Amino acid sequence: MEDLPLPALFEQARKIHADATESAVDQEVVKKGCQALHRCEDMVNNLGLFSSNETKEDISTANLKYILVPFYLAELMEKIAQEDRLQILKASQAKLKEFISFCEAMELVPKEELESYMEGAPKTVVDQRARKIARFKRQRAAESKLLEIKERKERRGRSTKAAALSTPVEAGEEEVLDDEGEEEREAWTTTISLAICKALDLLDMLKKEDEMLSAVKDRQSKDGAEFSRDVLDERAKKAEAWHRDSAVRARYTKPSPPITCATFAQDVLEGRAKASQAHDHKHQPLIFGPASLVNGSLTTERERMAAQVFQPSHRMPTMSIEEAGLKEMEIMNKWQERNVKLMEEANSSWHNDRKSKPGEDDDDEDDDAAQEKARAWDDWKDDNPRGAGNKKLTPCG
């Protein structure tokens, strides 16, 4: 890493910063990125790339990106996992303040952000919300501009490659190089503006975290010794032992569950009991009054009135599910008994088919008279064929 030149070292650290920002990376990688950025910072100071007498127009395009070194270093330092979190927070805040101060000297900080930064934290919630909204809008505008520059660069690269394959371009080549330089400068300036918005947000967050940790540390120092891992482990063991003993005691202190209507109905269905056996089937109505909140009983007139007032809008059931099941079983038993009687009657009717019944002779006489009438009608039809009386239809009549 020490043998790499400044541009290659910066690109390596920038890639580590991008990976750490997009997703979680190993702590060794984060520390490696911090070392690379520290090396970049030393090389920038030794080479004297920036001066306090310069402005952003005096800085060359190739050196403009090195302004972001303190910002990248602050973001990577904030991701380091260390027991002394306060030290990490203070170091990260120092780098962020250094970055914002240098951008202020180079006239890169917007006027609104500079005024809000000099004023400090807003006094009211409305001002704080307005400041966050304005910063978010500037951040979105910078991201959109960077995306536009990237697409424009890719589009120009494709067109230049296609033109180079078809016809070599000779005229206007210097203008294209100048356009690329201006575009690169615009991209780095926009990246610095986006970094300023992120740095201000991160600085506010680190300040709040610093205040919280400092307050906790002061409270612990006032109460006495600091909480150690041994103390916490001892408390956890005591809590586990208490819960284990409570579970053992609960076996003897809790009463056995009583037999309810649901269990009795299950016994009836499985044949272990009969529905005719004596059993107290009671369905307690639901109470929506204050007595239901404490699982108590309606003892006073006030509670009875309140329970009558706070009732649901729908109709309440008149019987429980167990009672409805038992009633259906009773109906089914009656229906089966009736079917058994009908089957017995149907089977026994075969023995009475040949027995005489009252009124049987009258039915036989009616049948004989009908048979005689049918025979007389057949004889008449034989004597008088169809159409015999119509003389007009006969050709020679």
Image (spheres, grey):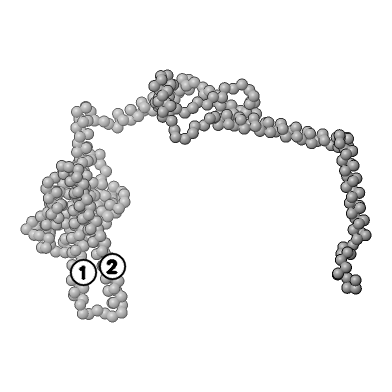
Image coordinates for residue 193, horizontal then vertical, percent: 19, 56
Q: In which quarter of the image is residue 14?
A: bottom left
Residue 73 visible in the snapshot: no
- Residue positioned 26% across, 30% down in the render: 227
Q: Is residue 6 above or below residue 294?
A: below
Q: Is residue 329 above or below residue 90?
A: above
Q: How many labels does the image show?
A: 2
Q: Which residue is drawn at 23% across and 46% down?
A: 78
Quarter the C terminus occupies: bottom right
Q: Name the residue under label 2.
A: 154
Closer to the chain start, of discs 2 and 1, is 2
What amino acid is at disc 2? Glu
Q: Nearer the viewer, residue 254 or 285?
A: 285
- Tell me the residue that label 1 is attached to: 180
- The answer to which of 371 and 202 lies nearer the viewer is 371
Callout 1 amino acid:
Glu
Asked if residue 200 can be seen in this view, the reply is yes
> Residue 268: x and y, percent?
62, 28
Q: In this view, does 52 lie to the left or right of 67?
A: left
